[in-house]
Image (cartoon, rainbow, N blue to C red):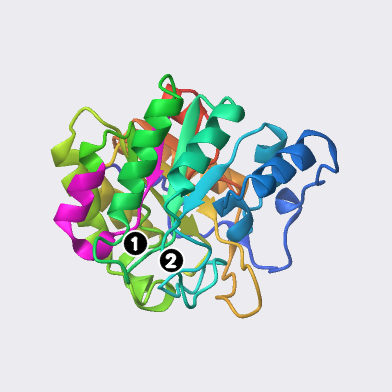
Amino acid sequence: MQKFPPEKRGSTDCSRDLRKPAWLRRRLPIGGQCAQTRRFLRQKGICTVCEEAACPNRWECFSRRTATFMIMGQRCTRNCRFCAVPHGPIGAPDREEPVRVAAAARELDLQHVVVTSVTRDDLPDQGAGCFVQTIREIRRQLPQASIEVLVPDFGGSSNCLQQVMESGPDVLNHNIETVAGLYHRVRPEADYRRSLNVLAEAAAARPDMPVKSGIMMGLGEDWAAVEQALSDLLASGCSMLTIGQYLQPTPRHLPVEEYVTPEMFEGWRQYALAAGFAAVASGPMVRSSYRAREMFSGDRV
């Protein structure tokens, strides 16, 4: 793999003033299509990761009548220190949720449907069955749409992952989130190698299907560790990559260690493409499902 451009390597090229920089400030839309989409989703009883994880792009996505559906509840069995989704007691999955999600996708006339979930370590199948039912229902109600699933690690269960793969998603996404050396601090209940195995097994099971992953910047990673993570992703069969800025959801979460500049994100995009990724979205506001349809279609994001 080629080295990062020498003039940038060894320097973080980021803001050391940890006040939020200008490139992360946006004017939020008020009313209009954004409010309509938000109201529609709430009326239909649809949960989105856009709202539950406090995604900074949710206003833009709602204005474009898009959203990433989050299934199996609003609480997670894990407590990652970067994530805004709450941790706590969880009820049984709603059996009607797959039908509601598919109906909402149909009414929004989505061309590319993205479905994710909380982690459900409490379920015997880790939630794989809910993904399968949701994919099948979307296929039934919206057969022309492509489907992307952003899955948890299923506790390392190959059988659970295989169930999801056999249901026929068009993209399998599983985020490693950060570099190996920060897992104990950022994702204490996850495992770096286990996440790579999810990607590798998905790529082996469906060589024709894009496998996607994402990583956050600004948690204290060094450039060599990021390069190694990208190398590990490529070796696992990952072909699509998202790179974005970590933003602290609340004071209880991990602090931002650095704000990486837009120019540096562009440098990482070029580096990743040269290294062998087929599609890369890299920027301060990029998230794993941001403009996923455009990325799946091969457009630059």
Q: Residue at x 73, y 57 (%)?
A: 21
Q: 91 or 18: which is nearer to us?
A: 91
Task: Classify 112 as above or below 16.
Answer: above
Q: In which quarter of the image is the C terminus?
A: top right
**Residue 255 at what x, y percent from top left?**
59, 74
Task: Please tell me whether mark 1 sits on a helix, a strand or a loop.
Answer: helix
Does residue 74 appear to the left or right of 24 in the view shown?
left
Q: Disc number at residue 225?
A: 1
Task: Please tell me whether mark 2 sits on a helix, a strand or a loop.
Answer: loop
Q: Which residue is drawn at 77% across and 34% down?
A: 33
Q: 49 or 237: which is nearer to us?
A: 49
Q: Which residue is situated farthest in the top direction here? A: 144
Q: 212 or 66: which is nearer to us?
A: 66
Q: Disc number at residue 32?
A: none
Q: Name the residue under label 2.
A: 221
Does residue 114 appear to the left or right of 3 in the view shown?
right
Under mark 2, the amino acid is Glu
